[in-house]
Image (cartoon, rainbow, N blue to C red):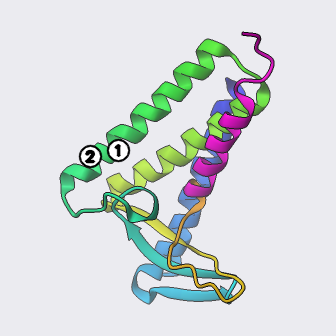
């Protein structure tokens, strides 16, 4: 479990530091966009009030609290699952990625009322209209890792 908590802490801190730099230091919330390595990597400010790709993103304050509760419930369930099953180190690492990213986005919803997304990547003539953040990358990688590694070594 130590690996899980360490990974979650590193992801959380990295996510929050990048958001402070982008939102406050670079003032992306006012500037709107900064081309870093166009068209491959750009900073584009997007306030996500919903889940992935803005789904369920109505402006009701209730949805904000529902999404906070869901993220905390999923994080608690993953912690309980990892403690109960004691899977391998890759599962603990994956769970830490997921939990750290989820908590990072919860903090955004508490501080800003929405998740601060700012990374935008496009390639090969296809313009990606969506933005994401470090927490989103960690959540995706963590969920994928749990799918790939959590059942290893168990017999039916």
Residue 68 is tagged as 1
Q: Which of 109 and 74 is in front in this view?
A: 74
Q: Report x, y in % for residue 138.
A: 62, 50
Residue at position x 33%, y 38% in the image: 69
**Residue 94 location (% of width, % of height):** 68, 38
Q: What stretch is highlighted in magenta?
A: 136-156
Disc 2 crowd rating (10 Å Cα; few below 14, some 14-19, many 20+) is some
Which element is circle 1 on?
Answer: helix
The residue that appears at 68% across and 40% down in the rendered structure is 7
Which quadrant holds the C terminus? top right
The overriding secondary structure of the stretch rendered in magenta is: helix
Q: Disc 2 on helix, strand or loop? A: helix
In this orientation, which residue lies closer to the viewer: 112 or 152? 152
Magenta-span inclusion, residue 32: no
In this rendering, position of residue 100 left or right of residue 73 = right
Quarter of the figure with the N terminus: top right
Place residue 72 in its image quadrant: top left
What residue lies at 34% left-to-right and 44% top-to-bottom?
A: 68
* Contact? badges 1 and 2 (CB < 8 Å): yes
Give above or below for 74 relative to 134: above
| Membership of 145 in magenta stretch | yes
Q: Residue furthest right?
A: 153
150 sits left or right of 25 in the view: right
User: Can you give x and y, in whole percent of width and height, for residue 77 in the image?
Assistant: 48, 26
Residue ID for mark 2: 65
């Amino acid at each position: 479990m130590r690996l899980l908590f360490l990974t979650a802490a590193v992801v959380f801190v990295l996510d929050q530091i990048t958001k402070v730099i982008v939102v406050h230091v670079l003032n992306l919330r006012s500037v709107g966009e900064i081309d870093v390595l166009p068209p491959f990597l750009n900073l584009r400010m997007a306030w996500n009030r919903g889940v992935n790709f803005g789904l369920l993103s109505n402006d009701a304050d209730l949805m904000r609290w529902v999404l906070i509760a869901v993220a905390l419930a999923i994080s608690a369930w993953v912690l309980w699952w990892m403690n109960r099953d004691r899977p391998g180190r890759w599962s603990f690492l994956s769970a830490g990625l997921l939990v750290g990213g989820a908590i990072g986005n919860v903090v955004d919803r508490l501080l800003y009322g929405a998740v601060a997304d700012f990374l935008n990547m496009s390639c090969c003539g296809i313009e990606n209209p969506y933005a994401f953040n470090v927490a989103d990358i960690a959540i995706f990688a963590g969920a994928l890792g749990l799918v790939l590694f959590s059942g290893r070594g168990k017999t039916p």
